[in-house]
Image (tube, rainbow, N blue to C red):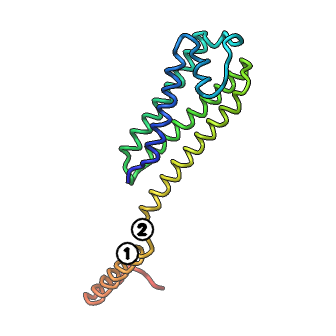
Amino acid sequence: MRHILSSFLALHWAAVFALLAFICIDGNRGVATALGVLGVPVQNTRFADLENAVVVAPLAVALLVVAVLFCWAFVEALTSDTTNPDPADSVMRIAFISALGVLSLIVIGGAAQGINGLFMIVAVQLAALLASYVAVLAERRSTVAAAVPGTGEIRAAAHVMAKAAAHNSSLARISGRLDSRDDR
């Protein structure tokens, strides 16, 4: 069973972070525009340091790395084997942790610059990331739960195993071989 929700969420977050990275590299108010896309109103008169390459380049690279991680998680979600979902889970976990780290760094950098209203906007984004991660985990667990055999299948397997044990025991008694267990 393919993980539809996981792949959709990974693609969504990859597009969001790639768009933010693309907006951020714009030399003319790039970071301020990216923060505006997030929902933070930033006036161009107070924050002249946001156009500095020392601020723009690391932020754009960090956003791009997160976008690439979510793209990788998208590919892993599409191609992962349902019997071994560990590689897709680890990539998804790394992508979400990286996204949380970048958003946390944005809050720290915004607080250092004195940007008002940034905490609430990033808190909403963090809540959306957390909800996405919980949805991915729920989908993975439902897939694993669907792969676990039901009660009827377990009873049928136990019945077949009991019949095989009885048959082997009967053959051992007929042939005169002794049982290998000591019942003392």
- Counting residues from the start of the chain, the first of labels 1 and 2 encountered is 2
The residue carrying pointer 2 sits among few (fewer than 14), some (14 to 19) or many (20 or more) residues within 10 Å by Cα, namely: few
Residue ranking furthest to the left: 175
Residue 165 drawn above or below residue 147:
below
Q: On the rendered structure, is 163 left or right of 148?
A: left
**Residue 72: x and y, percent?**
42, 35
Eye-nearest disc, 1 or 2: 2
**Mark 2 residue type:** Pro
Residue identifier under label 2: 149
In what element is the residue under mark 1?
helix
Secondary structure of the residue carrying tag 2 is: loop
- Where 166 sits versus 88, above or below? below
Residue 42: x percent and y percent? 67, 19
Q: Is the residue under label 2 in contact with that under label 1 (CB below 8 Å)?
A: yes
- Look at the image and tell me in which quarter the N terminus lies: bottom left
Q: Residue 129 appears in which quarter of the rendering?
A: top right
Q: Position of residue 139 (x, y in %)?
A: 49, 52
Residue type at mark 1 is Ala
Packing grade of label 1 (10 A; few <14, some 14-19, many >=20) is: few
